[in-house]
Structures are given as structure tokens and as C-alpha cells.
Image (tube, rainbow, N blue to C red):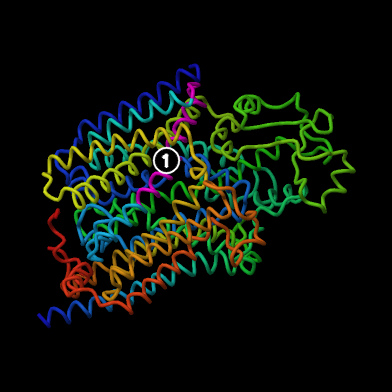
Amino acid sequence: MELQTLTYLVVGATFVLYIGIAVWARARTTGDFYVAGKGVHPVANGMATAADWMSAASFISMAGLIAFLGYDGSVYIMGWTGGYVLLALLLAPYLRKYGRFTVPSFIGDRYYSRTARIVAVICLIFISFTYVAGQMRGVGIVFSRFLEVDILTGLIIGMGIVFIYAVLGGMKGITYTQVAQYCVLIFAFTVPAVFISFQLTGNPVPQLGLGSRVSGEDTYLLEKINQILVDLGFNEYTSGARARIDVIAITLALMVGTAGLPHVIVRFFTVPKVADARKSAGWALLFIALLYTTAPAVGAMGIYNLLQTINPPDTPADQTLAYEDRPDWFRTWENTGLIQFEDKNQDGQIQYYNDANPDFEPIARARGWEGNELEVDRDIMVLAGPEIANLPNWVIALMAAGGVAAALSTAAGLLLVISAAVSHDLVKTVFFPRISDRAELLVGRLAAVVAILVAGYLGYNPPGFVAQVVAFAFGLAAASLFPAIIMGIFSTRVTREGAVAGMLTGLIFTFGYIVYFKGIFITPLAEDIPENWLFGISPEGIGMVGMVLNFAVALIISRLTPPPPPEIRELVESVRVPRGSGTAQDH
Amino acid sequence: MSEQQNRRDAYWKANLKIMAWCLVAWFVASFGLGILLVDVLDKFHLFGYPLGFWFAQQGSVYVFLIVIFFYAWRMNRLDHEHDVHEE
């Protein structure tokens, strides 16, 4: 069957499935809408969390990032999985015991302060919108590439689908849709990986294939990639170039940021028991690990295939692929602009090498090379994977459905925490405390509609900060929300003054540092290079320093201010023991 | 009341101890073996993987999984030992 038709069929079928689930799992109460009535089985919740968590970036971009960064790409693997340990050990069980609907409610109650709650809402909204705009962008891109509609049309279709199941179904609809979306995305990601791994190494398990020998040869795949890259003037694939302190800072900021992201935390409010919250984090990580341990293999095998294509084996080093002989997938992706070739030395051949390496310069000159001629967008490693490996059309169609599933599931989760923060923490708590359950549900739905429209607009006209999702969303979550929650559970002495001062310090410092180097709203004040960074820590990793500052300021100010009232001590002590978590409660 | 208080305190102390050991495992697998000791470990190989590289891109994730499921299992027992489990 024609690829185009097949793609429409596969993507269309998944949409019918999502909408069907949404209609079946309509939300009837605010409890259903915010936390799915707290009746979700831990395994189902784990799957939903995994889909919620794995965004368009995890699905489309991460393997490609690793392909071009090699060892340095490990920060994403460790950072985006290690956060679940922190969630399971330090946050999830206690927040589930506390048993309210949103993250700002916990912060507001624990710090007996409306100001603390409002600061938390502001952090939450900024983090979530940065994140959701990137997802909507991802939806638009996947649609435009695979279905050949323009980005705006793609965005509107995506917004329509999310609208139906997020507004109608709330958390309940989202949770069960996400279970389906997880199945679609993991299948779409692993099937091509299994084929590619089997083709290259004879081992169908990508995690093992990456450590195996190349089929029919005596060399290990990773050794071979190292060799090819070094011969082209690059660093070894398995060794890093980034300063160790920065690797540590980014990894820690991503881990802590993951544990502080409101749309991830809120998933653990939906399970029936405290014991389930602990277990559910494990299930979530298991489902995430399926993709995250496959991605390094997809990345490495992708770069290997690409290098083998450009520099065919058994030919002299100065003889590279002639532009005329480029394979079909190369032509297809050239049309999208994701692969660009410029024949700098006019020899009709494609040269791909590290032209920024002065030691390699003489070798390149001797071969008549006048600069790197190939620009490859990292997203290609996943998107073009099936074509590079000559897989059948249905696998390519599946990739489209998987990419859309990854983006939609994350977008829906984010939209829900935004709408819950607005309807529950602002409208109900701050402005109209007497609002009825039904009216609050209506406000929640309206807030979700507005959030979808804003997210769609941001996706279509992405402001600069959307490109800095890693720095902004994770850095700010790490520097603002995470420390406030942790201190709220593990200390009875931290006061509202301490918590508010700490959150603001972490927030302003981290935000300021990122803006200082990345610009965004202003022109950058200094060049974004290691020589200028504080302690050699990049803006991506600065959330770690923001977190330390938040803790330090909060603890010092708490010593200097009167201790929290006795009922707060009671609250903290009751959060620490599982008994009595039974009933879902509102307040 | 104070008997209940003592029980809660003992439970919380035991929990913090288990938590601390789990966090040590979390830290060693990622920051230790995957980052700080990566050059030393890369001299050894696990099939085609340099060992440090394997920890950074595979092993640490497996350790994280074991840590979470261990903690969930151990805490479930601790809840019962201290009689603070959910009804």
C-alpha cells in the first residue's frame, strides 16, 4: 500500500482509539477530573506516567542527541531516569498520603501561606507552558513531515484531539488514553530498533546488540564507531568532551528537575494507596527504561549507518560517497531540509568530518577537503531510522503514530496540571472559596480550553524560551518546587518565610543565569562558553546551584523566624505514616 | 498518644535509614560509576561496552529500577512491622 495512505490509516486508527477511551472514561466529579478518582491500578498508572513523561523530545530527539554526543549524551539517560528514584523515595508516598489534588495545595498548606501557594502556582504555570509549547510544536512537525499537511493544520488537529479527551475526561480520560498511547509509542520505537540491531549485529535485543560484534566481523560495534569517528577528526564515541563538573551538574539538575515537575508528581496522587505510590514509580521507570535503554543503541547504530553510507568501507579514506549515488532516504530527507549538502570543494563527493579540529586540518587539506559538507539534523536518527534500514512501509507509518502519541500524551498531562492549578489553586482557594464542586469542574474545563489555545499559539509562534526547555523547565523545577516539597516533608522547622524566600531565590537566580547566557527576552549579556560560566556549569546544569541556594536560604531564614504553628507539625507527622490514606479528600 | 508517637518516631527513623542506603546505591551507580570513575572503569569491558560507558548509558538505569522496587518491598514490610500500614 502507498505509504501516505498507510500513515493516514495508522494515525487515524490510533485517534479513534484515544477518543473512544475518552468517551468511556468521562469525568463526573472534580476528583475524577483532577486525580482520576484515585482509583488507578499502580501498573496502569506506571504506564500512564511513562507516556506522560516521554515527550516528543524523548521519542524523536533523544537518540539523535546521543548519536552526536556519544558519552556526553549519558546525562539525558541518567538524568531523566534517576529522578524516579528521588520521586519514589522522597516525594510520591508522602504526597499521596497528604492526599490533595495539586502540588501548590501541598506547598500552600504546609507553609500555612497563601503567598507560598501563589509562588508555587506561578512556578508551575511557567514550567508547564514552556514544556507544553515544545510538545505542540512536536505534534505540528510530525504531522507536517509524515502527513504532508502544513504545521498549522497539524497543530489544529492535535489541539482538537487533546481537547476532546483532556477537557471531557480530565485526569481519568487522560490516564486511560495515556496507557494506550504508551503501547503505541513503545511499539513504534522498539520495532525499528530490533530490526536495525539484528541487521548490524545479529542480536535482536538492542541493549545487547550495542555491546556486540558487527555481523561477520571480529570488531565490536562501539570500537568500530570510535575508530571511524577518530579517523574523521572527532572524539571517540565512548569518551566525553564535556567538563566533568558540568556533566555532574546537568545530570543532577535533570534528576531533581524530573522529580519536581508538577505533571509527573501529580500522577502519584491518582493511585489508591501509599504503598501503590512507591510501587507505581517503579513501574513507571520500568516502562520508561524500555525506551531509555533502547535509545543509546538507536543513536549509536544510526550514526554508524550514516558514517558507513558516507564513507563506504573498503574504499580509500579520501574516496567518499558521490552525491549522485546517494540513497533514496537521503533524497527524501533532503527535501525536508533535515539533511543538507553543500559541495564546498566541488568534487561531487560528500565529506563529513570535524573541520573544527586543528589537528585534523593537515589531513583534510592533503585529501583536498575544504570543510565539512554535510549538515545532519539529529532528529533524523529516529525519524529516518526505518528507511535507512529498509524496513517495510507499515513500520514508517508506525513511527508517525508513535511520535504523535508521545507528544499528545505529554501535552495532555501538562494541560491538566495547568488547568488544575488555575481552577483549584487560584479560582477556588484564592478568589472564590465557596464555589461548588460542579462550578469548579466547569472552571477546570474552561481553564483547560484556554490552556490548549495558548499552548497551540505558543507552538505555532514559539518564543525563544521554548528552545531552552531543558534549561528552563528542569532547571526551574529543580530550583523552586523540589526543595520546597522536600523540606516540607523532611523538616518540621522550615517556616513559611523560609520557604517563600528559598523558592524565590532559586527561581530568580536560575532564571537570571539562563537569561544572562541565552538571552531569550534580552540579548545575551555574555557568550555561552565554558570560560564564562560560574564554576564551569552551563545554563542547562545551573538548576543544581539554584537548588542548593534554595535549601540554604530557606534553612537560614527558618532559623531566624518563629517556628510553624503546632498543627503544621501534626500535618507533617501524619504525612510521614501511611495509615489513614484511605479516602480521597477535598478541602 | 505517646505510645503512638514513639511508634511513629521509630518507624520514621527506620525509614530514613533504608532511604539513606537506597540513595547511596542511586548515587554510586550514576555519579560514581557512570561519571566520576568512568575513566578507570572504561579500562574494563563488558562484551563490547567499556564498563564506565555501560554504567552511564545502561547499568545506572537497571540499578535505579532495583533500588525503587527494593524500597517499595522493604517499606511495605516496615509498615507492617511498625503497624502503620494502610487498612
Label 1, secondary structure: give it: helix
Task: Say which amino acid is labelled 1.
Answer: Ile
Give the vertical position of A100 relative to A553 (above or below).
above
Give the vertical position of B36 relative to A559 (above or below).
above
Residue A528, x across and y down, in percent: 63, 54
| Residue identifier under label 1 | A186
Q: Is residue A102 left or right of residue B62?
A: left
Quadrant in the picture for residue A54: top left
Q: Which residues are magenta?
A: A124-150
* Residue visible at 59% across and 67% down in the picture: A535
Residue A553, x across and y down, in percent: 40, 72
* Residue visible at 68% across and 31% down in the picture: A340
Query: How many numbered callouts?
Result: 1
Instruction: Verify whether residue A315 appears in magenta.
Output: no
Quarter holding the C terminus of chain B is bottom left
The chain containing the residue under callout 1 comes to A
